[in-house]
Image (cartoon, rainbow, N blue to C red):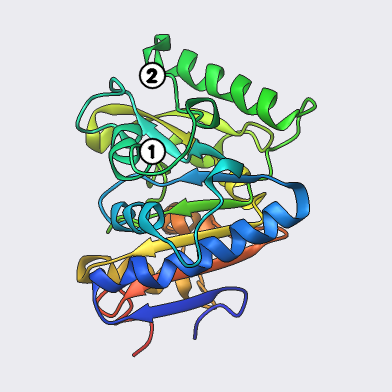
Amino acid sequence: MIRPSLRLCVVETVGEIAAAAAPIVIGIEREAIARRGEFRVALAGGSTPRPLYELLAAARDPHPSFECWQVFFGDERMVAADHPDSNYRMAREALFERAPIAPQQIHRVPTETGSAAQTAAAYNAELQRCFALAAGQLPRFDLVLLGMGADGHTASLFPGSSALTAPPAQPVVANWVDRLHADRITLTSAAINAARAVVFLVSGADKAPALRAVLAADEGATPPERVPPARTIAPVDGELVFVTDRAAAALATD
């Protein structure tokens, strides 16, 4: 049984994920703009979200109100902004170069700052400035877009990594990932769970076992260290949506 607190949208193929997710994103955007005149979104990296960004940039009816967007990132690799592995570079190519989003509306992770710890501190400061946060407050994104790996990681919250036990009031942390032998910068679970909406985009049969565990209504007696990080995402006062292809959802809906 699937957790009743989430909405699952299953499409046949990976190519249909963007088309299913776009109206969800635009609906959340319109609600945010009606409420505050601004849409604060944290983008996901990886390959699955790219078609969504391209589709949003080309959308005409309805057309996103890009002039009202403030764009952030859920995670980033410690690479230069023009590096092939950069989440910012992917978003720039798929969205920023195609849509009328001004540079001052884009808040990328400043990986040129120095160490991973310094970069995380700089992005925490940027969030504090943009959201006018008091000490101990978390940013409240209108939308956080996420993907998920076959190991159940999301953003750069990897199994067994220190980010999973980060202080609750710390929105961004540097996270060393042993398997990758690399540092990542990531929003914490607490920061993601403060959002008004979280939308996962998940594709591929290799994700099916992890997705079943993430969606299950009862995780049973699973030890905490074996719970997929994506399972920790449950907005405190917001909507949780999964848009998946049939292959990824095969074990969750059988």
Residue 13 marker: none
Please name the residue shown 21% across and 66% down the image.
Answer: 206
Q: Is residue 26 left or right of residue 32?
A: left
Relative to 182, is 65 above or below? below
| Image position, residue 153 (x, y; %) | 37, 51
Q: Which residue is mark 1?
A: 96
Q: Is residue 85 left or right of residue 92?
A: left
172 or 162, nearer to the observer = 172
Say which mark, if any, is on residue 111.
2
Q: Crowding near pointer 1: few (<14 within 10 Å), some, many (20+)?
A: many
Which residue, as the protein is rendered here, is positioned at the far front?
60
Residue 84 location (% of width, % of height): 19, 31
Secondary element under disc 1, as helix, strand or loop, is helix
The three-letter amino acid code for the residue at tag 2 is Thr
Relative to 70, is 214 above or below? Answer: below
Image coordinates of residue 158 in percent, x first then y, are: 38, 44
Q: Quadrant of residue 100?
A: top left
- Name the amino acid, label 1: Phe
Mark 2 lies on a secondary structure that is helix
- Numbered disc total: 2
Vertical position of residue 209 compared to residue 55: above or below: below
Looking at the rendering, which quadrant does residue 95 occupy?
Answer: top left
Report the mark closest to the observer, 2 or 1: 1
